[in-house]
């Protein structure tokens, strides 16, 4: 044990002095997260532009006048800047074609009487090519108004058909059109195991670069063999497993610290809350152990540091992309069950649970997956013939 601690301490100090390790483990992923944060924050910045709505409606139609008043009431609501111009049909179409109006609403003659009678009636909307989200909002309001009028007409006709007194029909129509749904909507939290876009990106990138960070242990072991350091260590009364275990322990420490820093700083940049600190710490430790366990397999098959670097990159990208480091991965059937065994996917799943309020007792499944991954890698590494650093 003393030999293990001495080798681990000396190698850890060497790694901490190696600026390339720190740059790759911390600076590169933070720079990548900052770029993603800049891109995604600008993508989420939606600009509502002023728009002009040209309305062509019969002058003597009181229901069409109500529609026009509804559109005017949108001006100043929720940052909308709406200008309503009453024009004839030809002028409305021309304004849209010339770009002077974003939307033209063409209300047909007899709109009011037909709508009150429950007869089919169409309000034509002409939308300009440059119309954006603000035009969608206006058209949604118009669609809602027309549905409300139709619901009132149907209610009135149904009430009269069932013998409701004429004096009671207005109250019945008002209840049907303004009473709202017969249920209550309550704002809730996202379901467990679901991270929002920013938090998922932070967690995914942390899991991806964790796999690269722990790979420095394998590379260091093979570099020591190529430089002759490993031969000198093996000439001493030190068991071979102590040398490998010291490299693995260094990788574990570096991976844990780097992942914790990335989650902390990434959460700050993306305003993400991963929940209970003890639960998140347990997930980070298990994820680091899972990533480090891959090292035991690579160290037995890679003959040179270049081969180890290539193998580490392949494993990291396959597990990272398959685990959702860049974008959510959806699959069905047996493939989905295979993807669930990915330690990166398990890390994201566990962080989703903790971000939704879960604690240590709620992350048993992702922890079991990552520890099971560790066990499988250790068993496989013992079965694979040693052609690497210790051969």
Image (cartoon, rainbow, N blue to C red):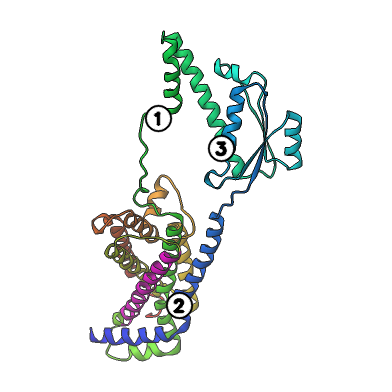
Q: Are marks 2 and 1 in contact (CB under 8 Å)?
A: no
Give the mark toward the camera: 2 or 3.
3
- Dominant SS of magenta comes to helix
The location of residue 68, given as percent across then percent down, is: 61, 31
The location of residue 72, given as percent across then percent down, is: 59, 37
Label 1: how many Cα within 10 Å (few below 14, some 14–19, many 20+)? few
Give the camera-side residue of 206 and 290: 206
- Compared to residue 251, the image places residue 238 above or below, namely below
The location of residue 349, given as percent across then percent down, is: 36, 55
Give the camera-side residue of 381 and 25: 25
Tell me which numbered mark, 2 or 3, is placed earlier along the sequence: 3
Give the camera-side residue of 267 and 212: 267
**Horizontal side of residue 176 vs 87, given as left or right:** left
Query: Which quadrant would the N terminus be assigned to in this image?
Result: bottom left
The residue singled out by tag 2 in the image is 303
User: Residue 73 has which mark?
Assistant: 3
Place residue 267 in its image quadrant. bottom left
Element type where label 1 sits in the image: loop
- Compared to residue 377, the image places residue 164 above or below, namely above
For the question of whether residue 310 can be seen, the reply is no
**Horizontal side of residue 281 vs 316, given as left or right:** left
User: Residue 383 has which mark?
Assistant: none
Magenta part of the chain: 243-269
**Horizontal side of residue 331 vs 364, given as left or right:** right
The residue singled out by tag 1 in the image is 181
The location of residue 113, given as percent across then percent down, is: 59, 16
- Compared to residue 226, the image places residue 272 above or below, namely above
Place residue 239 in its image quadrant. bottom left
């Amino acid at each position: 044990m003393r030999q293990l601690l001495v080798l681990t301490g000396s190698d850890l100090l060497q790694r901490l002095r190696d600026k390339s390790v720190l740059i790759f483990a911390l600076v590169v992923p933070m720079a990548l997260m900052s770029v993603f944060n800049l891109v995604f924050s600008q993508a989420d910045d939606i600009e509502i532009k002023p728009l002009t709505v040209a309305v062509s409606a019969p002058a003597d139609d009181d229901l069409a006048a109500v529609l026009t008043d509804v559109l005017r009431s949108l001006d100043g609501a929720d940052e909308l800047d709406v200008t309503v111009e009453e024009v004839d049909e030809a002028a409305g179409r021309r304004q849209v074609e010339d770009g002077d109006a974003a939307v033209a609403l063409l209300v047909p003659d007899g709109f009011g009487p037909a709508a009150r009678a429950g007869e089919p009636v169409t309000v034509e909307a002409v939308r300009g090519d440059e119309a954006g989200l603000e035009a969608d909002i206006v058209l949604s309001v118009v669609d809602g108004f027309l549905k409300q009028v139709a619901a009132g007409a149907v209610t009135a006709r149904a009430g009269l058909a069932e013998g409701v007194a004429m004096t009671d029909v207005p109250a019945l129509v008002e209840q049907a059109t303004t009473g709202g749904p017969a249920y209550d909507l309550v704002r809730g939290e996202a379901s467990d195991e679901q991270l929002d876009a920013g938090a998922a990106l932070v967690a995914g990138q942390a899991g991806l670069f964790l796999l690269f960070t722990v790979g420095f242990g394998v590379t260091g072991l093979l570099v020591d063999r190529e430089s002759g350091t490993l031969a000198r260590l093996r000439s001493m009364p030190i068991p071979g497993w102590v040398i490998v275990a010291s490299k693995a322990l260094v990788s574990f420490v570096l991976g844990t610290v780097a992942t914790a820093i990335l989650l902390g700083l990434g959460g700050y940049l993306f305003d993400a809350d991963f929940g209970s600190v003890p639960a998140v710490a347990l997930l980070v430790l298990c994820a680091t152990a899972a990533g480090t366990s891959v090292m035991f397999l690579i160290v037995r098959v890679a003959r040179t540091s270049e081969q180890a670097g290539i193998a580490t990159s392949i494993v990291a990208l396959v597990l990272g992309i398959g685990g959702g480091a860049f974008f959510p991965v959806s699959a069905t059937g047996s493939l989905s069950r295979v993807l669930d065994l990915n330690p990166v996917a398990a890390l994201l799943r566990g962080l989703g649970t903790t971000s939704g309020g879960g604690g240590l007792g709620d992350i048993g499944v992702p922890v079991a997956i990552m520890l099971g991954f560790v066990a499988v890698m250790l068993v496989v590494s013992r079965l694979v013939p040693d052609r690497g650093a210790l051969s």
